[in-house]
Amino acid sequence: MAKYVYLFKEGNASMRELLGGKGANLAEMTNIGLPVPQGFTVSTEACTRYYEDNQKIGDDILEQINTALAETEKICGKKFGDLENPFLVSVRSGARASMPGMMDTILNLGLNDVAVQGLANQTGNVRFAYDSYRRFIQMFSDVVMEIKKSYFEGALDEVKKAKGAKFDTDLTADDLKEVVSKFKAIYLREKGEEFPQEPKVQLLEAIKAVFRSWDNPRAIYYRRMNDIPGNWGTAVNVQSMVFGNMGDDSGTGVAFTRNPSTGEKKLYGEFLMNAQGEDVVAGIRTPQPISALEATQPTVYNEFVKIAQTLENHYHDMQDMEFTIEHGKLFMLQTRNGKRTAGAALKIAVDLVDEGALTPEQAVLKVEPKQLDTLLHPNFDPSALKKASPIAKGLPASPGAATGKMYFTADDAANAGRAGIAVVLVREETTPEDIEGMDLSKGILTARGGMTSHAAVVARGMGRPAVVGCGELHINETTKTLTVGDKVFHEGDAISIDGATGNVYGEMLPTVEAAVSGDFARLMDWADKVRTLKVRTNADTPRDTKQAVAFGAEGIGLCRTEHMFFEADRIAAVREMILADTVEQREVALAKILPMQQGDFEEMYKALEGRPMTIRYLDPPLHEFLPQKNMTEEIAALATQLNTTSEKIIEKIDALHEFNPMMGHRGCRLAVTYPEIARMQTRAVIQAALKVKKECGYDIVPEIMIPLVCEIKELAFVKKLVVETAEKVFAEQGTKLEYHIGTMIEIPRAAVTADEIAKEAEFFSFGTNDLTQMTFGFSRDDAGKFLGSYYEAKIFESDPFAKLDQDGVGKLVKMAAKLGRETRPEIKLGICGEHGGDPSTIEFCHNVGLNYVSCSPFRVPIARLAAAHAAIKAKKN
Ligand code: PEP
Ligand code: MG
């Protein structure tokens, strides 16, 4: 028979998947002889069975629970519902990965009308017994039976008022008896039945409630944020109660072996005498620092310090512990690797290596890649953040804190930014033309768009905090107002956004600069030594390039050349090219663009100091470069400038209009219809490379990347243009250089025919933004609008545009990599979609054997660390 229930003495730390983190650690502490109140763990497999069996606990599991219960009663020498020595338990969740505060807990279970007297007899403290009983009734009713907490709080207040009691502690034993009968009456009124007196019934209901809490909305949300799969389930720990509220020689507290906020090596924590854990959390009484325990309970304190050290040595990591003192005796209720800030994580990891407790590789695994984000951007002052309440919540598209005055157009934002005002750009959604306004803003907030929307991608690239797709916002760009609920904000009003949480605040919040200490560099150095996957960056300006190189980028994996077309001083020439009627006219306009584009590439090659760069040819549909039809003034100005009429321009705008521009005339299709664009770009790349090579001596090997290819002949067509032009330049200059031509794999057909495509392509870069869009058939700019319902309905656990869908899109990537290598064994493979900066995707890329990932500059350190994690994990398996 399968085993679903384990006594603490039957488990150990390696059984985390089965017993959950808490259960495995309780077992481990039991094994190493620490004072742990005994009990048993109902496994995570029992939780998954519970869901498979239509939310029922199977008879076999029930039987095992009863056996374990009987065994635990024996170990503890107590009995459920006993008048002499009643057995009381706590029932707590405990998943494989820690999910603090997300699921349910029930304390004092086992109390009923008899056991409460037993507890009073045993302790000689009637008041304590009834206080515990009323707490249990309330907790059970709220957590297990979903009866409103406020009913109980109201009843308690009534009794307090009637008795003239200010605090709960002013109530006498008799008062509390009255509270208990009132609570039981509420239960009867709400449930139509008496409060359950049979402890086994209480226990079973409580276990089911903990299983159910695995699927409460906040747990689901937490899992999505932290990449925790929904099918893991939670274990349930049933543990004999010890009481911290038995008088002045009892107490309860929490402590960390090191400071979780700074990493300092010093016991850090707090405790409260004569209290239960919930009193510490409720914040009614102020706990004392752990060091104060030394004066009042020196023996307990010394024992605790010793245990804390034993646990840290045992786990080779900073521990977060819960303890209770019952009549001067110390009990350990929990230990786990403590959550910590990014700065503390780095310090602790590096210190543990210096102390000889960890090897550098083990230390690398102790720091979560995603956590580094907070070290790279300014953040809100945590105390100010605690006091503030958000007015709305959107998608956390680009981390960091931004605070300033709101502006509703990119031009207004740019003007204010130039005038030294801290600006938050608030837009319905951004367009490529907003780039300057975005750049001059401290942060970007949009009402529409998903994690790969223009605003999100560009903001991440710039390292600018951004919250996108915040549907609660009503933005009126004409009246320059932002409405949320019944609040209306105007241009210049204060606003703050938190790009790490998606929270939006209608006020200025103070920020603090993030400090990057020497520990950061040491840890990254260890990470670099072990990783095999290279890390490049997506950048198209020298400034972003320098930033990325400073963060350790080993080259550029994606230079999107269209961004270079939007600059104010060249958009005119680009528009002239688009509006041209003949090839000759177009070539005249392109000749104006050529020196600018060449200049850009020269700057980029210089910023890279010899590192490689993959230059992607023009990708977006041309209409993006023209004004919108309703921008009458701009159209008139353009007409004058180009010596034509507004009508002609509107005609062209109409002609370029597409119903599905994302699947329209873009990518290499532009080069097929306008070969002269590809020719101009080739000339710019080759001439820039030759020039910088000569001037600076860098060994430059241009990598030219043709986007959105779906058919080998398409690639061959564009490749021919590139080769012919390059040869022409070589002939003109009397010198040559090596260069490579490759393609993006971003259309399913390209992935499926990758063996064919590799005949022409010297490298592949997986454009997983488009590949995800086209594999799912979800518009990358609009999916955010309905993905929320997909999470709720449990169709999806995460955003496929942020975390690669390994089963579907990933299968295409794997297949294309394999097919590509069959044709061209030395083919270079990389990824440059937004997924390139996501740790779980990076692990996938490592395992598929890609050569590099490419991500926005501010994610480069994250990618380096994630690549190291992937390499270490792969070695272990
Ligand atoms: C992609 O599609 O993944 C990609 C990198 O290209 P873009 O985002 O520019 O379409
Ligand atoms: Mg693309």
Image: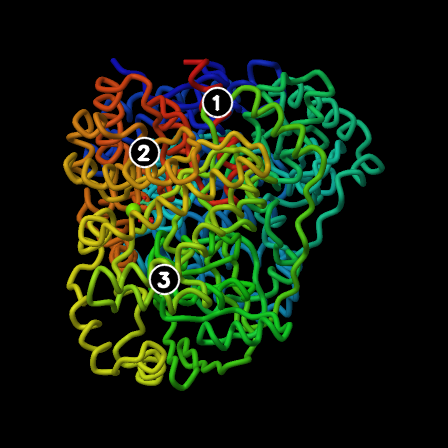
Q: Residue at x 34, y 82 (%)?
A: 640
Q: Nearer the viewer, residue 632 or 473?
A: 632
Q: If the image is split into quadrants, where does the N terminus sit?
A: top left
Residue 250 relative to residue 296: left or right: left
Identified at 64% across, 62% down, the residue is: 384
| Residue 51 visible at all | yes
Q: Is residue 113 visible?
A: no
Q: Amino acid at mark 3?
A: Gly
Tell me: residue 443, above or below residue 757.
below
**Mark toward the viewer: 3 or 2:** 2
> Of the residues under marks 3 and 2, which one precedes in the sequence?
3
Of label 3 and label 1, which has the lower sequence position? Answer: 1
Report the Cα–Cα distance between label 3 and label 2.
Answer: 37 Å
Q: Tell me, for residue 523, which label it has, or none.
A: none
Task: Work out whether residue 423 or residue 99 is closer to the camera in this orientation and state it.
Answer: 423
Looking at the picture, which amino acid does disc 2 mark? Ile
Disc on res. 741: 2
Numbered tag placed on residue 24 in the rendering: 1
On residue 469, the disc is 3
Disc 1 within 8 angstroms of ligand 1 (CB): no
The residue closer to the viewer here, 365 or 311, is 365
- The residue that appears at 50% across and 81% down in the rendered structure is 491
| Residue visible at 57% across and 62% down in the picture | 402
Classed neighbour count for the residue bearing mark 1: other residues with Cα under 10 Å, few (<14), some (14–19), many (≥20): many
Whole-percent x and y of residue 140?
41, 47
Q: Position of residue 686 (x, y in %)?
A: 41, 40
**Most foreground residue, 75 or 358:** 358
- Whether the residues at callouts 3 and 2 have beta carbons within 8 Å, the answer is no
